[in-house]
Amino acid sequence: MNDMNWLAIYPEILLLAMGCLVALVDLWVTDEQRRPTYWLTQLTLVVVGAMHFSYFNAGLTTYAMQGMVVADPMGHLLAGFASLATIVTLVYARPYAGVREMLKGELFILSLFTLLGINVMLSANNFLVIYLGLELMSLSLYALVALRRDHSVATEAAMKYFVLGALASGFLLYGLSMMYGATGSLSIPKVFDVISQGVPNHSVLVFGVVFVVAGLAFKLGAAPFHMWVPDVYQGAPTPITLLIGAAPKLASFAIAVRLLVEGMIGLAVDWQQMLVVLAVVSLLIGNLAAIAQTNLKRMLAYSTIAQMGFMLLGMTSGVVNNNTLSAANAYSSAMFYAVTYVMTTLGTFGMIILLARQGHEAEEIKDLAGLAKRSPWFALVMTLFMFSLAGIPPTVGFYGKLAVLQALVATGVSFYLWLAVFAVVISLVGAFYYLRVIKVMFFDEPTDTTPLTAPSDVRVVMSLNGAAVLVFGLLPGGLMALCAQAIVKALAT
C-alpha cells in the first residue's frame, strides 16, 4: 500500500495524455466538422472504457499512490459506464454543435477532462483526491456551459453554476476539514478505523458529516440544495446539459459511498437521518414542481431532483438497528438505480438534441406535438424513456425503483415500510408529467409536419439506447448482479 503502483491508474494516465494530445492535434485541424478531433476523442473513450471493464472482470482491488487511490471493482464498473455515457453524449452532441458554432476542440478536450475528474473521484481513497477530482470535473463543466460565448442565457447559466458549485465545494471542503480535525487523518480507511474505535470528538464529527452531506446533496442536485439544477439544465446548451446530468451522477454516487459508507459507516445513524430528509424533500419538490413546467428541459431538471431522491432512499437502509446485514442490498440497489437513471437520461436529452434544428431549440413540451406522425420510431423510443423515468414496466426504470423499494421493505422496520409507501404514492403523482409528454407526442397535432431526419450514427445510437432501456427492463438480472458484485467487493475492502 506504500508503493506508487502506476498500473492501477493506467486508464487515468491514458486519459490525461490523450486529452493533451487532442488539444495539440486540434490546433492543426482545418475541417469544420472537426472529424480528426472527434474520432480521436471517441477512440480514447472506447479504449479507456474497455480498460475499466477488463479491470472489473479481473475483480481485483489494488492501491496506488501510497494508498491515496483505490482501484476496485465498483470504481472500474462506474468508470466504464461513465466512459460509455460520454461516448453516447458526444454522438448526440456533434450534429447539434455543428450548426451552432460549438463544434470546437474545447468541446472534446473539456469532455475528456470532465471524465478524468470523474475517474479520479471514482478511485479516491483520500479526502484530497476526492476534492482534486471534484474540482477537475466541475471546472471543466463550468467552461462547457459557457461554450456559446455569444449566448446570454448560457452565460447566465454558467455564472449560476459556477457560484453555486463553488459554494457546494466549500461546504464539502469545510466538512472534510472537520473530519480531519476530529480523526487526524485524510485517509478514508484511517478515518473509518478512528471512528470504529470510538473517537471522543463525536460532536465535531457529526458537525463535519452535516457539511459533507450538504456538499454531496449540492452535487447530486437533491432538495433543498437543488436551486442550481433547473436554471443550469434549461440555460446550458442541451449537449452540455446531458454531460452534466449523466456521468457526473455516477461520480456523486461513488463519493457518497466512499465517504459515508467506507469512511463514516460508524456514524450511519446520523447521516442516514439526513439522507431520509433529503430524499423525502427531493421527491416532494421534484415531482410537484415538474407538473407545472412547460419547458421540457426544466421539467426533466425537476425530474432529476426527484430521481436523485429515490436513489438516496436506497442509501438510507444500509445500517438498521446498528447492524449492516442489509448494507450490500441497499447500496447495490442505489447503484443500480443510478446506472439505470443515467441510461434513460442519455436518451431523453438525446431526443431533445435530435429535435432541435437550425435556429430553433426544441425545448418546450409542445415541440414534441405530433412526433408520432413525423417519426413513429422516435416517438416509440421516447415513450420507452418516459415509461422508464416514470417507473412503468417493462422498462429498466421500473426495476430500478423496485430494487430500492425492496431494499427498504427487506429491513422489516415499519419506518422504512412507510418510506416505501410514500415513495410509491409520490411516484404515482410524478407519473402524470411523463405521461403528458406521451399524450402530446401521439394525440396533439404537429406544428411542423416535415419528417424527422438524423445522421445515421445518431439514429443507430438512439435506437440502441432505447433498446437497452427495454432489454435491461426485461432482463435486469445481469446488471443487478454486476452492481451487487461491485458493492460487495467494495465493502469487503
Image: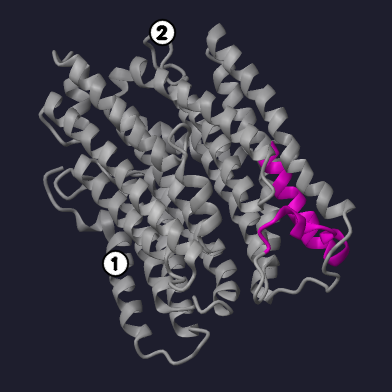
Name the residue tied to disc 2.
321
Rendered image quadrant of residue 405: top right
Rendered image quadrant of residue 12: bottom left
Circle 1 packing at 10 Å, graded few (<14), some (14-19), many (20+), is some
Image location (x, y in percent) of residue 402: 64, 28
Name the residue tied to disc 1.
16
Q: Is residue 79 positioned above or below 95 on the image? A: above
Check if residue 175 falls in the magenta segment.
no
Q: Is residue 277 positioned above or below 460 on the image? A: above
Q: Is residue 454 positioned above or below 9 on the image? A: below
In the image: residue 129, left or right of residue 154: left
Q: Is residue 478 positioned above or below 347 on the image? A: above
* Majority secondary structure of magenta residues: helix
- Which part of the image, by quadrant, shows the C terminus? top left
- Which part of the image, by quadrant, shows the N terminus? top left
Q: What amino acid is at disc 1?
A: Leu
Camera sees residue 246: no
Name which residue lies at 21% across and 35% down. 174
Name which residue lies at 54% across and 10% down. 415
Image location (x, y in percent) of residue 117: 33, 55
Q: Secondary structure at mark 1?
A: helix
Name which residue lies at 49% across and 78% down. 103
Q: Are marks 2 and 1 in contact (CB under 8 Å)?
A: no
Stretch in magenta: 362-390
User: Label 2 vs label 1: CA separation?
Assistant: 45 Å
Query: Which of 438 and 483 lies nearest the eye of the viewer?
Result: 438
In the image: residue 377, left or right of residue 363: right
